[in-house]
Image (cartoon, rainbow, N blue to C red):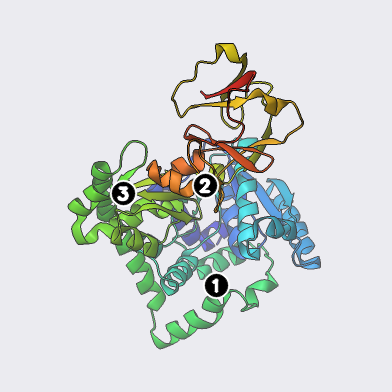
Amino acid sequence: MTDSDKSPELLRIVRKTIERHGLLDLRRPVLVAVSGGADSVALLAVLCELGYSCVAAHCNFHLRGDESTRDMRFVEQLCERLGVDLTVSHFDVGRRMAQSGESVEMACRSLRYERFDRLIDTFGAQAVAVGHHCEDNVETFMLNLSRSTGIAGLCGIRYRNGIVVRPLLDTTRQCIIDYLGARRLQYVTDSSNMSNDYRRNRLRNIVLPVLEEQFPGAGKSILTTIAHLNDNRLVYDKAIASYAAHCVKGNGVIDLEKLSAEAAEAAPVVLYELVRRAGLTRSQADDIMSSPMRSGLLFKGDGGGYELDRGLLTPVDFSAAESCDEYEVSLHRDILTPVNIAVTVGDIASFRPVSDPRVAYLDASVLDRDRRWTLRRYRRGDRLEPFGMKGSKLVSDIFNDAKLSASQKRAVRLLVCDGVIVWIVGLRASRHFIVTPETKRYIRLELR
């Protein structure tokens, strides 16, 4: 009996999975993530055996001392044996955690997939293949169930998610071990897999064995449930798409009044499906639908966010909103950043003021001595001493009087001189440095 006769099962299953889900094309190379563990070793070997042109990618996070080096050396020897090109990436996980605030697991995951994105381009690969199998799918289902999720979270791991494909997803761990034994392929074991400090490890090492012992066949039943949920999701997604077609405008703004009328009591569920890609939670969707006509509320998620303004939910780019808050500027020339303001200086004889909030006038004597001029965003507690009025007024009240939305408020800049607000650009001028009968030259500022 040949080696090929001893292990048809894994080859047959993987070939069928690839064909059924259209995961890979024999004519293009595939990047294979290889840690040195049983799953990734089997994945690389099976794809090579099925005729795919593979490039192995190994990530060394240097978190386990000599064991990390051992894994890297093992993968190097494996690729040499299989005749596969290998690329090794080294990472400083601690530095990433300090910069991003991520956990160890999330930092490793982010670094790994960022690197895969670059390697895909480098090698012209069609996808990156990873070694998740069906027991991993059961673990993911249980993890998502334990921390509260919607139908998407209960649908388990996808066969394809962007550039990532999972050809082993229909195989069992035992099937993988049998294949490795038949092919006389060794693998390494990550000692951290035995540590129950991680949620997934506790589930794998403690919870699922007890569940299987008390309810034999529970794992297979969960996989069947996942398959049924994926079928149900096809109908569910079509319904969500139908609501989106009626209630989401071309610029991504969600009309909550329309959504409430169309979806009735299901509106919070539909809204959650529309905003969850921005990282918003179901509880945030419930809060939005409970008071849809409120104004100026911001809802931030991991991947973006929205502003609620009188029945409309508008996408917000928080990365732009949180960019540089203050710019130093000069009134001796036009201002181009962060807003475009034309600056002209003229003799008082040519002074012809216009009543336009986009235009402000100052006595040019402000240029006679060194002053610090800045353009910045509104800060809580800012006050303006408005032209034509006594006393001062909160800038936030001026915004509200103008009925500005939260996104419009963030876009407004304040022209400040030595800490004093001189102009709410495009909205209201102060009584500081105004043109008087004694003025000889004036400055005209126009928001363009």
The dot on residue 391 is: 2
Residue farthest to the right, as pictured: 66
Q: In terms of secondary structure, where does tag 1 sit? A: helix
Q: Nearer the viewer, residue 126 or 245?
A: 245
Q: In terms of secondary structure, where does tag 3 sit? A: loop
When the figure is inspected, residue 247 is found, relative to residue 368, above or below; the finding is below
Please report whichever mark, 2 or 1, sits nearer to the chain's N-terminal start.
Answer: 1
Residue at 55% from the left image edge and 72% from the top image edge: 200
Q: Nearer the viewer, residue 83 or 264?
A: 264
> Residues under labels 3 and 2: Cα distance?
32 Å
What percent of the width, then of the height, locates residue 118? 63, 41
Mark 3 is surrounded, within 10 Å at the Cα level, by few (under 14), some (14 to 19) or many (20 or more) other residues, namely: some
Quarter of the image for residue 192 reads bottom right
Q: Is residue 155 visible?
A: no
| 3 or 2: mark nearer the eye | 2
When the figure is inspected, residue 340 is found, relative to residue 407, above or below; the finding is above
Mark 2 is surrounded, within 10 Å at the Cα level, by few (under 14), some (14 to 19) or many (20 or more) other residues, namely: few
